[in-house]
Amino acid sequence: MHGPAPLKPSQLRWTCAPEALGFAHSDAVTAPTPFPPEGRWRDAFALAVALKRPGYHVFAAAENGVPVEQAAQETLAQAAAQGPTPGDWCYVYNFANPRCPNAICLPPGRGADFRAQLSQLVDDLQQALVSTFEGEAYQSRRQLIEETLKERQENSFRALEREAQGQGVALLRTPQGFSFAPLKEGNVLSPAALAALPEAERTALDHTVDGLKERLQGILKEIPGWMKQSQEALRTLNKRTATFAVSGLIDSLRSAWASIPEVPAHLDALRDDMISMAGEILSWIGKGQEGGGEANPLRRRYGANLLVSHAPDAGAPVHYEENPSYERLLGQVEQRAEMGSLVTDLHLIRPGALHQANGGYLLLDLRRLLQKPLAYDGLKRALRCERLELEPLAQHYGMPSTVSLEPEAIPLQVKVVLFGDRQLYEQLNALDPEFGDIFKVFADFEDELPRDAVPLPDYGAMLAGLAQEAKLRPFAADAVAKLCEVSTRLCSAADRLSLRTQALTDLMVEADYWAKGGTVDAEAVRRALTEREHRLDRLRDRLNEQITEGTLRIETAGRAVGQMNGLSVLSIGQFAFGHPSRISAQVRLGGGEVMDIEREVHLGGPLHSKGVLILSAYLGAQFGQRRPLAASATLVFEQSYGGVDGDSASAAELVTLLSALGEVPLRQDLAMTGSVDQRGRIQAIGGVNEKIEGFFDICAARGLTGTQGVLIPTANVRHLMLDERVVEAVAAGQFQIYAVSRLEEALALLTGLPAGVARNADGVFPEGSVFARVDARLASFAEAQRAHRQRGS
């Protein structure tokens, strides 16, 4: 037999021995291995944590299913525990500019005390003001001021009244004001009696009354001044009284917070405002608005809004924001309905994730961040400016905002970690000039690792930890061993283990469902795999049915010229399966071109076209050195109605083309996958397991003969992690898998003839070889072309 020997069953699949794990079931593992192991990503995180400079934020890149969030949180939690605890932040009323509440930073854990003490201060000040202003001393002084004003007015009016009576005129007080009337013998003259007086006497009386009116006007003009003096005296009394009432309480609180300059300054402003607002405060209290709830206007004016608080010894915060919208990221100023309108105050300021993580670490999913309007821009602006400004979202859309507050900005010191895939990283680097300046640290997470890089018991312990974390039934050692084998299949390599723990956890959950006893065994894992495949393989079954029924022509027996079974992989979500395709070639007289029909009808992708051009170059190098190639050829994937891409069928296409050129029949019970280079070397491809299993299923459906099999690149042997049914068939001699590294090995297997790629000293290929037949056919084409040209001339 020509060609390499078939692979042994032991080369087709790695089997994990349960005893190699070192435990009987997953609950016996008391210290699960942390995920993931050491790697370059840890070095990246260490650099970002150590550098406190602007711009050294982290982009953590990982494939879907790798628990990068969990790994980052655990790693950063260790660093955060050693870091300083950031202070508490609160907002208080700005008495100089009420639109801009002041931000105050307090020692960690003291924010709640400050808020409570201010709240208690408001209650105490209310009581102190009420008791002081209702006290006998204040009331006596107030009464004295009021009586002094009243007595001064009365004395002035009485003096004017006496003066008028001395001149025979009475000063009358009416609801409409003051008036003068003549007197005679102590009685007011009637209008008739006044008219009966002599003209001279009436003129004298009018002159007297005019003089008295001038005196009255002078007194009335002085009264506002007296009232102003009285009111000023009353204000002075109120100020002194309020100062006496509040100063003691505020001075006591002021001394308790003397070490934080912003607090005494605020308390001084609060005292001045409360003294100046004493009358309004007493009016509020009189209206019953002095309750203990947040609706109390005094508490809303004089209380504190504790925005962020930390336990004193908590270390730096590590915050993961699940929903990174603009408001949840940067905070917002809420509003409440009051008397049919929207109002707000400092107590409606709400913190965002950046406030919560300030002084520590913030973890965000980039894809979710980009889905939220303006959230990404808001994050960049905050990181670039290193401060947190509460700006309404409507403002960025050019819409009028109903929010009337502009809180003071808070300094921002945070390390942000973005999670995303590598494609997103490349896109942002290309499209956003600021991205690379802000996220300078790239943490690249592996999604798999070499099997010899971690002891198998440690990896098994990690899987045991996943079962414990998911609160599943204990997994027996044979079930964990089966999961290790599934892990290698996820990597499409028998010498690697997957770090996509989400996929493994999902399988463990399903295996727990199918388990029948108190523990999950290997059979339950197999059942979970089978049931999952059954849920997803409708399309595969339909394609296989069409092949077995003859609708799609795939030969699995006999020989044919210019026809070969190629292999491809189709995917539905996370489910991938192999599918055989019939490749055919036709040759004719021509100028050496190879027509790729898929490319001509725009169904071939660039990688497939590249593969066809490479095999064309190989043909030219082998057979076009001594004379021009006098043949043209066409290549096609028969019954292919969709796009074709990739170069994994280029080796099969080259074999098919050589078969058509040399009229050498090819075995139809074999399929082939692999790419070829310009020197005839067979190169590795992807999806090797799925491709082998896809052709095996067709052969099994028609009946295994023992001669059927698949040719794969030698470089793909390390990737083999075939299904147990295929390995069992190979062990029974019912199916064969061959590894080839050069085109001549494949030709020998497929034709039963030596390839004969080396010419002898005379430049002739070995007699009876495939290349000799191809060369002879090309020579006949050249002779036919020459004869045709001679006849034409």
Image (cartoon, grey):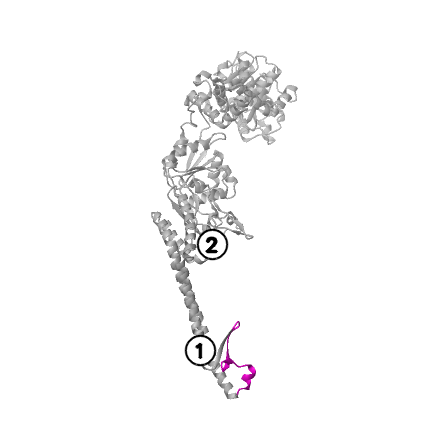
Mark yes or no: residue 96 visible: no
State the extent of the magenta-drawn residues as a range: 174-197
Q: Position of residue 629 (x, y in %)?
A: 55, 24
The amino acid on which the numbered mark 2 sits, given as a three-letter code, is Ile
Was residue 190 drawn as part of the magenta stretch in this picture? yes
Q: Position of residue 340 (x, y in %)?
A: 56, 52
Was residue 384 drawn as part of the magenta stretch in this picture? no
- Determine which residue is flagged by label 1: 162
Q: Position of residue 292 (x, y in %)?
A: 47, 48
The residue lying at 55 percent from left, 85 percent from top is 195
Q: Using the image, determine if residue 562 lies above or below residue 606.
A: above
- Determine which residue is flagged by label 2: 285
Q: Position of residue 367 (x, y in %)?
A: 50, 37
* Left or right relative to 238: residue 533: right
The amino acid on which the numbered mark 1 sits, given as a three-letter code, is Arg
Q: Spatial distance from mark 2 to mark 1, Cα to Cα?
A: 47 Å
Q: Using the image, determine if residue 203 lies above or below residue 572.
A: below
Query: Depth check: 55 or 379 in front?
Result: 379
Q: Secondary structure at mark 1?
A: helix
Badge 2 or badge 1: first in the primary sequence: 1
Q: Residues within 10 Å of mark 1 (few under 14, many from 20)?
A: some
Mark yes or no: residue 24 visible: yes
Query: Depth check: 87 or 696 in front?
Result: 87
Quadrant into which the C terminus falls: top right
Identify the disc placed on residue 212: none
